[in-house]
Amino acid sequence: MMLYPAMKDLLKHIPSRYELVNVVACRARHIAHEAELSGIPLEEKPVSIAIQEVADGKLEASSAHEADQEAGAEEESVPAQEPEDSQE
């Protein structure tokens, strides 16, 4: 099974496999959240986009954690909507 980009290329940007998985997962959640809010359909899966960003050197461990913290702060500031009562 060949993976592109290769793991060794990804590890040049983020040296720990554990941290790489966390960074990609955080960024993928952020990408999916942004796409859902904007209503734009994604041509690729969010994880594929996040992996490509790491391979291109656009994403580092610190930037992904900051983006995840910002997304968490945005979710806390948005009030939860009450479900409508269907027993009327």
Image (cartoon, helix red, strand yellow):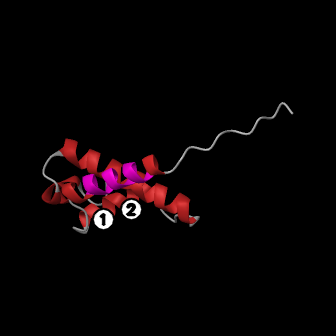
Question: Label 1 belongs to which residue?
Answer: 53
Q: Is residue 57 left or right of residue 39?
A: left
The image shows residue 9, relative to residue 73, as above or below, that is below
| Whole-percent x, y for residue 71 in the image | 39, 53
Viewer-proximal residue among 76 and 33: 76
Task: Tell me the chief SS of the magenta region.
Answer: helix
Q: Residues within 10 Å of mark 2 (few under 14, many from 20)?
A: some
Question: Label 2 belongs to which residue?
Answer: 49
Picture quarter with the C terminus = top right
In space, the residues marked 1 and 2 are separated at their CA atoms by 6 Å
Residue 37 in which image quadrant: bottom right
The image shows residue 9, relative to residue 1, as above or below, that is below
Q: Residue reaching furthest top? A: 87
Q: Residue at x 35, y 59 (%)?
A: 50
Circle 1: residue type: Glu
Tell me if residue 1 can be seen: no
| Whole-percent x, y for residue 64 in the image | 27, 56
User: Residue 67: within the magenta?
Assistant: yes
Stretch in magenta? 64-74
Circle 2: residue type: Ile
User: Residue 47: within the magenta?
Assistant: no
Tell me if residue 33 can be seen: yes
Q: Residue at x 20, y 45 (%)?
A: 19
| Whole-percent x, y for residue 44 in the image | 48, 62
| Whole-percent x, y for residue 83 in the image | 68, 38
Q: Report helix, strand or loop for mark 1.
A: helix
Q: Residue at x 84, y 30 (%)?
A: 87
Q: Is residue 87 left or right of residue 12?
A: right
